[in-house]
Amino acid sequence: MNKGTIARTAVLIIALVNQVLTMAGLNPLPWSDESIYTVVTGVLTVGATIVAWWKNNSFTEKAIRADHYLKSIKSK
């Protein structure tokens, strides 16, 4: 399974639980659009931060030259 399948399945399960609760006369899941937006934004921010930190980001001229040198060695 890929990440998209997992995400779609999770959303489907949440929607089904919400619908069953509503049909049973119970309060639906207590999440507002704003709280969902806040959580999704937070997860995306943390994910982007981890990826940016993990990935080799070269800022100095020496580091950039070293990256080019490494790429040339790997391509041979």
Image (spheres, rainbow, N blue to C red):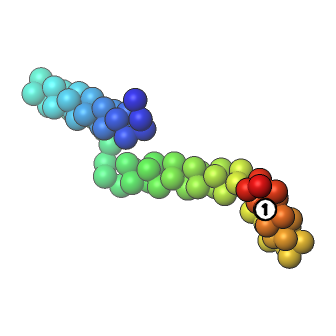
Farthest residue toward the top?
24
59, 46: nearer the viewer: 59
Q: Confirm whether residue 56 shows in the render.
A: no
Q: Which residue is drawn at 16% across and 26% down?
A: 20
Q: Which residue lies furthest to the front in this view?
A: 76
In this view, the residue in front, 27 or 62, is 62
- Binning the other alpha carbons within 10 Å of mark 1 as few (below 14), some (14 to 19) or many (20 upward) gives few
Percent position (x, y) of residue 7?
36, 38
Relative height, residue 48 to residue 61 (above, below):
above
Residue at 34% across / 35% down in the picture? 5
Q: Is residue 51 above or below residue 19?
A: below
Q: Which amino acid does label 1 sit on?
A: Ser
Left or right: where does residue 70 sit relative to residue 45? right
Residue 76 appears at what percent x and percent y?
A: 77, 55
Percent across and percent down for residue 72 are 78, 62
Q: In this view, does 8 lie above or below 66?
A: above
The image quadrant of residue 49 is bottom right
Taking the spot 25% from the left edge, 34% from the top edge, the residue there is 12
From the viewer's perspective, is 50 left or right of 16?
A: right
Task: Provide the secondary structure element on which disc 1 rests.
Answer: helix
Nearer to us in this view, 52 or 32: 52
User: What residue would you read off at disc 1?
Assistant: 72
Question: Where, quadrant-wise, is the N terminus in this rendering?
Answer: top left
Report if residue 23 is visible in the image.
Answer: yes
> What residue sits 85% from the left and 71% below the top?
65
> Residue 55 placed where, x, y %?
70, 54
Give the number of callouts.
Answer: 1
